[in-house]
Image: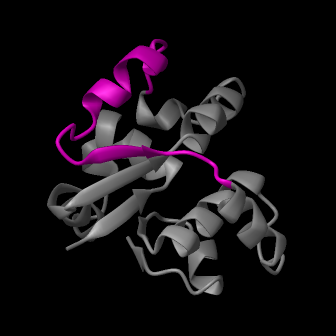
Amino acid sequence: MSRCLVDTNVLLRACYAPARLTVKAAAAYLAADELFYSILSPWEIGLKDSRGAFRELNVPTDWEQTLIGSLRHEVSKLISVEISHCRRIENLPFHHKDPFERMLNAQARVENLTVIGSDEMFDAYWVKRIW
């Protein structure tokens, strides 16, 4: 049984630019028994999209309405930020300073999830990553 957490960038690629996923990432996304996305992802998209961070992925202006509908409904689950995730982030070394990436890392570790993501930061924290 595969339980995967999609990084924000992978979430956007899977929904709006699937050709921009690696073969391994696309296969993991399609084969996951449970596919989690964090409540952090819409927050990160809103913040970073306002600076034009995702233009190359053709993110539509109504992404907040289309994003979730583009996911694999039968296996997709929202993961909230829990106190246990906040406790885990407290003990992470500062290999990476991006608060979104740090919390995704904490969520993956606490929930025992494999991350589908391009950011090598996950490797520094001993999180299983597929890209």
Residue lying at the far front of the rendered structure? 83
Q: Nearer the viewer, residue 25 or 102?
A: 102
Residue 115 x, y percent position in the rendering: 44, 68
Picture quadrant of residue 28: bottom left
Q: How is the image coloured?
A: one colour
Indicate whether 17 appears above or below 27. above
In the displayed structure image, the side of residue 64 where residue 16 appears, left or right: left
For the point 22% across and 48% down, the residue is 75
In the displayed structure image, the side of residue 122 where residue 20 appears, left or right: left
Residue 73 x, y percent position in the rendering: 21, 37
For the point 45% across and 63% down, the residue is 117
Residues in magenta? 59-82
Q: Nearer the viewer, residue 97 or 39?
A: 39
For the point 82% across and 63% down, the residue is 97
Q: Nearer the viewer, residue 19 or 102?
A: 102
In the displayed structure image, the side of residue 99 where residue 11 appears, left or right: left
Q: Nearer the viewer, residue 99 or 83?
A: 83
Q: Quadrant of the N terminus?
A: bottom left
For the point 56% across and 33% down, the residue is 42
Residue 70 x, y percent position in the rendering: 27, 30
Picture quadrant of residue 29: bottom left
Residue 64: within the magenta? Answer: yes
Q: Quadrant of the C terminus?
A: bottom left
Residue 111: within the magenta? Answer: no
In the displayed structure image, the side of residue 49 where residue 93 appears, left or right: right
